[in-house]
Amino acid sequence: MLCTGGRISKFDTIRIRNLEFIENYVRVNPGLPTKTSRSLLFETKAFDDTCSCPVFTLKQYIVSVSKNAGDHFSATKSTLATWIKLICLQSGIQPINSHVIRKMVTSLIFFNGFFLSHAFPKF
């Protein structure tokens, strides 16, 4: 899963009031179009296995937070990014970002014998 800043921004637009629980699925309608896209509406169906079910997890999270919530503050984009990285790490997935991809490509090119002097002989 590759979460870019743009995708995290979309997650950031989701609010509890934008969630609609209907029988065995949840409908998410942030309703806030961005400069580059229309408003987003999607539905996620519940899984039979509650251990891996996003709908069940979301319901449990809302119940848990509503019992313990104090002042209502939105999670920041950096908090969401941190949560995504932690979820990936706990799942055994190495989080990948643009820096890792650039480093990998640069190393691959270098170890295969391609140097900048080949591409730019004047430098």
Image (tube, grey):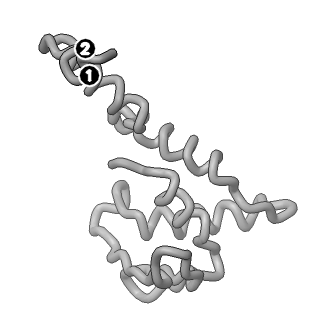
Furthest residue toward right: 71
Q: Quadrant of residue 102?
A: top left
Direction from residue 119 to residue 56 in the image, left or right: right
Look at mark 2 in the image and give the residue it sits on.
117
Question: CA separation, marks 1 and 2?
Answer: 5 Å
Direction from residue 99 to residue 105 in the image, left or right: left
Q: Residue visible at 34% across and 73% down?
A: 46
Q: Quadrant of residue 69?
A: bottom right
Callout 1 touching callout 2 (CB < 8 Å):
yes
- What secondary structure is marked by label 1? loop
Direction from residue 11 to residue 51 in the image, left or right: left
Q: Residue visible at 24% across and 17% down?
A: 121
Three-letter code, disc 1: Phe
In the image, residue 48 lies at what x, y percent? 27, 68
- Nearer to me, 115 or 120: 120
Q: Residues within 10 Å of mark 1 (few under 14, many from 20)?
A: few
The correct choice, above or below, for 111 with respect to 49 in the image is above
In the image, residue 116 lies at what x, y percent? 27, 18
Q: Residue visible at 55% across and 76% down?
A: 34
The correct choice, above or below, for 71 with respect to 81 in the image is below
- Nearer to me, 43 or 11: 11
- What secondary structure is marked by label 2? helix
Tell me the tag on residue 120.
1
Three-letter code, disc 2: Ser
The correct choice, above or below, for 89 with respect to 57 in the image is above
